[in-house]
Image (cartoon, rainbow, N blue to C red):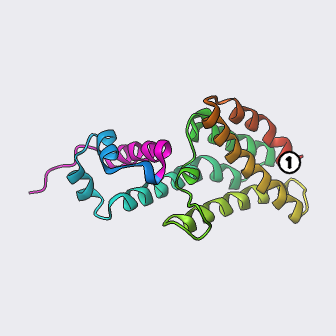
Amino acid sequence: MARPQTTDDEALLARLAEVFRQAGFAGASLERLARETGLKKASLYHRFPGGKQQMAEQVLEASSRGFHAQVLGPLEAPGEPRARLDAALAGLARFYAGGGRACLLNMLAPRGLEDGPFAARIKLSLERTIGAFAALAAEAGHPPAAARRRAARAVMMIQGSLVMARALGSPEPFRQMLADLPQELLG
């Protein structure tokens, strides 16, 4: 009879995500992943036969679900654009722990556009986020091309603020982005 799992999948993926957020894919050694999850390497391989790549893929999938629930879902919900944006910004603040949590897309991004096992998933995620922001900006009255530009800048602001927050060791760039994003996106 198989032994019961001692760590539930959600908690395990959260611990793995933190390692990838801190170290990136290359820096996340199996030894570190095992230590941070409290599992032996053999247990990790049992749960993830595809190794570190499978772990990162499942972390990205779980992160995508969480991002959709907290950010994209509110953007795509019915209601006034500003109220939906406010809900999405609150979701961003929760999702990125107020600017204290690095973005997995950045930490797992390949060096070149076509490189890496996660390039297509990362590109799709960014395009979907830009699309949701662009739809909101268009609904707020901006012409489609301008709405798309505003949405792309909004995503650049989000990603840039997370990089700056991490580099500076301060959530202030992220907080400032949250304050400035409504004007940038809705005008």
In this figure, which residue is indicated by the disc labeled 1? 186
Q: Is residue 15 left or right of residue 101?
A: left
Q: Is residue 159 left or right of residue 67?
A: right
Q: Is residue 160 left or right of residue 50?
A: right
The quarter of the displayed image where residue 182 is located: top right
Give coordinates of residue 71: x percent, y percent. Answer: 64, 48
Q: Which residues are magenta?
A: 1-24
Element type where label 1 sits in the image: helix
- 16 magenta-colored: yes
- 5 magenta-colored: yes
Q: Nearer the viewer, residue 187 or 153?
A: 153
**Furthest residue to the bottom?**
114
User: Residue at 22% across / 43% down in the picture?
Assistant: 6
Few, some or many C-alpha atoms within 10 Å of disc 1 (few <14, some 14-19, many ≥20)?
Answer: many
User: Residue at 39% across / 48% down in the picture?
Assistant: 13
**Which secondary structure class fits the magenta region best?**
helix
Q: Quadrant of the N terminus?
A: bottom left
Q: Nearer the viewer, residue 110 or 51?
A: 110
**Furthest residue to the left?**
1
Q: Disc 1 marks which amino acid?
A: Leu
> Does 179 appear above or below 153?
above
Give coordinates of residue 90: x percent, y percent. Answer: 66, 38
Give coordinates of residue 160: x percent, y percent. Answer: 70, 45
User: Residue at 34% across / 39% down in the picture?
Assistant: 36
